Image (cartoon, helix red, strand yellow):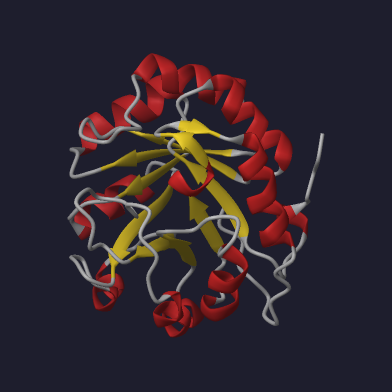
Amino acid sequence: MVDLHHSKNHSCPQVKVCGLTSVEEAIGCADLGANAIGCVFFPKSPRHLSEIQAKEISMALPSEVKKVGVFVNESFSNIMHKVEFCGLNAVQLHGQESPELVSRLQKENLLVIKALFIEGKPTLDEAKIYEASAFLVECGKGFLPGGNALEWDWAKVKNFGCKYRLILAGGLAPENVFHAVSVSMPDAVDVSSGVEFSPGRKDLGKVKSFLKAVSLCQLKKDLRKIF
């Protein structure tokens, strides 16, 4: 087992691996040092999974790894049903959810992540209307909600991250994450397609390389723990 101690090193970002569909791969990501695992509940996504699959993944993970459900414009009741059934302790809202929904979910003792977009809605300027635990920022110019494996100018969020807890996403991979982190200085990074061999299936060799690259990022700021 390789433990890269991301949660113990406050000068390198935490890591969320998103779009898991396999129990074995989720355990593998956790063993390698991922701080959070994401399960996508969006039917149009190639990484969409069933409640049963998500529950099996959640139950197999150690308690210190956050189990994040990713939702796009879902109702409070639908989100809470999946949270309770699957054993999730964090939600990521990746659509045009209302500030009221974010606040309501915060009261359920959940980590609530709101996605914002450089080229989409809601924008970075709208962060102030949300009572989110943290913000995930990506470009937002692809066909589907999510990074769509597209690189973008990550430096655009550096100032935003000085004010808010920032998760950097979109186009990240083992070969570019060191640069991306260096120019944006996020508290955490989110990777999905950059460590896959097919949609929803993770290449643990790539995951290991990604985590190693992140562990080399020694940022000159005290990063805020998210997961």
Q: How many marks?
A: 0
Seen from the viewer's position, the closer of residues 214 and 194 is: 194
Rendered location of residue 149, percent (x, y): 38, 53
**Residue name at image x 45 percent, y 73 percent:** 164
Asked if 96 appears above or below 218 in the picture, the reply is above
**Residue name at image x 69 percent, y 44 percent:** 208
Q: Quadrant of residue 83?
A: top left
**Residue name at image x 32 percent, y 46 percent:** 105
Asked whether, in this view, residue 83 is left or right of residue 66, the answer is left
**Residue name at image x 49 percent, y 50 percent:** 191
Rendered location of residue 214, percent (x, y): 67, 60
Q: Using the rendered image of the protein, determine whether residue 62 is visible from the camera's viewpoint.
A: no
Asked if 118 appears above or below 57 in the picture, the reply is below
Q: Quadrant of residue 181?
A: bottom right
Rendered location of residue 177, percent (x, y): 57, 63
Q: Using the rendered image of the protein, determine whether residue 85 is visible from the camera's viewpoint.
A: yes
Rendered location of residue 144, percent (x, y): 22, 48
User: Most extreme residue toward the bottom, as rendered?
Assistant: 159
Seen from the viewer's position, the closer of residues 225 and 94 is: 94
Asked whether, in this view, residue 34 is left or right of residue 95, the answer is right
